[in-house]
Image (cartoon, rainbow, N blue to C red):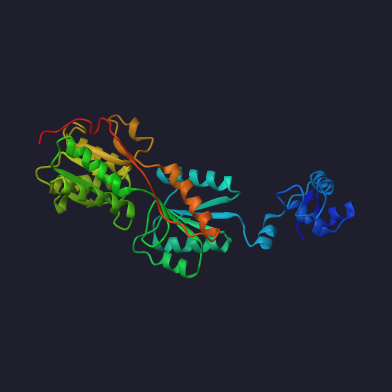
């Protein structure tokens, strides 16, 4: 029996029914119906009497009991590497907004991009009986997704894609291509890539988009000019140091697949006496709010982060409703700023 508490005393459906002189099942159907008349269970006048008494007595339905009745909790679980990452925080904002519009609540857990932690957090969410999962930390080589699919757990991917599973992402390949076109048109011919983590589709797709487009334009990208790295500023700095140490002559342009890695690279360039935007052009990815506010504003590919989160919710709702859903890749745009605005001699 569902219940609520008012004034220190528990109020049940049976209490309301007894006071009104009607059957508890009628009260239940009225209070859990979205219409004025609960599917013919009562007149409009009776329905209003029930709702008025429920308000007066401080009764509200128990969501856990409702979940048992409908086998839905209206909870969406979200797993990301780190919510402290500004990109993921904005995506989660989109998730939370879109879920609320559909009558769902959300909660998020961090996996730190660790496979074992991913598994633990997934099990923890499923133990809380979420209706479905939005997974923002998928690894290209992970077996966890196949296991979840075999168990018929409803889920979609966000930010990163894995072939065979529905996902909401930026068109990362196109983003890399936009950077290649931009730097080529500015006259650069000696370039390097700070490529990110090789297990993440964001890193792989952005790098591939850039390198393939660069080669199609007639350029070359030596093997030592593509350095895989962490997505943070320290990873970007270390990758830039490696590029400067092993590429001779040093490149006139760097593409970092993440804004924070680009910022780290800018620091490494300055420590070597190289002017960002003057000696070496730098382009990042995501166009976080920091990019335009740096002492030398950073050119960056704008990813529709909020819309990616909102789209992930729409895809998951489709899965929950039993519909076949297709992956969505949202279009990026290149924002050119001082860090790469000027040409460089061929």
Residue 147 appears at what percent x and percent y?
44, 69
Q: Quadrant of the C terminus?
A: top left
Q: Which of 239 and 55 lies nearest the eye of the viewer?
A: 55
Q: Which of 280 and 152 lies nearest the eye of the viewer?
A: 152
Give the residue at the far front of this rendering.
40
The answer to whether residue 257 is seen in the rendering is no
Q: Quadrant of the N terminus?
A: bottom right
- Image quadrant where residue 277 sits: top left
Q: In screen coordinates, is 324 left or right of 212?
A: right
Q: Which of 218 and 2 lies nearest the eye of the viewer?
A: 218
Q: In screen coordinates, is 76 left or right of 270?
A: right
Q: Residue at x 58, y 61 (%)?
A: 129
The answer to whether residue 17 is seen in the rendering is yes
**Label total for image:** 0
Residue 174 appears at what percent x and percent y?
29, 46
- Image quadrant where residue 321 sits: bottom right
Q: Which of 26 and 71 lies nearest the eye of the viewer?
A: 26
Asked if 125 appears above or below 240 in the picture, the reply is below
Q: Residue at x 22, y 43 (%)?
A: 180
Residue 229 appears at what percent x and percent y?
27, 51
Residue 15 appears at what percent x and percent y?
85, 55
């Amino acid at each position: 029996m569902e219940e609520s508490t008012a004034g220190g005393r528990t109020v049940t459906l049976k209490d309301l029914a007894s006071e009104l002189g009607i059957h508890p099942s009628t009260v239940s159907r009225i209070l859990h119906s979205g219409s004025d008349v609960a599917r013919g269970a009562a007149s409009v006048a009776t329905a209003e009497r029930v709702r008025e008494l429920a308000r007066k007595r401080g009764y509200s339905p128990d969501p856990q009991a409702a979940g048992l009745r409908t086998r839905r909790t209206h909870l969406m679980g979200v797993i990301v590497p780190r919510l402290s990452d500004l990109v993921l925080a904005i995506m989660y904002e989109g998730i939370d907004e879109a879920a609320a519009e559909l009558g769902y609540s959300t909660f998020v857990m961090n996996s730190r991009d660790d496979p074992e932690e991913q598994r633990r957090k997934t099990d923890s969410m499923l133990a809380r009986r979420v209706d479905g999962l939005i997974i923002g930390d998928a690894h290209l080589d992970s077996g966890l997704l196949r296991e979840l699919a075999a168990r018929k757990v409803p889920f979609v991917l966000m930010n990163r894609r894995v072939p065979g599973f529905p996902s909401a992402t930026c068109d990362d390949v196109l983003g890399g291509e936009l950077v290649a076109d931009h730097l080529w048109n500015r006259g650069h011919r000696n370039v390097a890539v700070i490529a990110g983590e090789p297990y993440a589709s964001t890193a792989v797709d952005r790098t591939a988009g850039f390198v393939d487009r660069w080669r199609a334009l007639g350029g070359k990208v030596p093997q030592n000019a593509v350095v895989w790295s962490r997505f943070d500023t320290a990873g970007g700095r270390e990758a830039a140091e490696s590029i400067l140490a092993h590429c001779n002559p040093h490149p006139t342009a760097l593409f970092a697949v993440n804004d924070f890695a680009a910022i780290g690279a800018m620091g490494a360039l300055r420590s070597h006496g190289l002017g960002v935007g003057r000696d070496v052009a730098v382009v990042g990815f995501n166009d976080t709010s920091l990019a335009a506010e740096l002492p030398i504003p950073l050119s960056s590919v704008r990813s529709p982060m909020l819309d990616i989160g909102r789209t992930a919710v729409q895809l998951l709702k489709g899965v929950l409703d039993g519909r076949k859903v297709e992956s969505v890749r949202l279009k990026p745009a290149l924002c050119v700023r001082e860090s790469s605005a000027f040409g460089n001699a061929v």
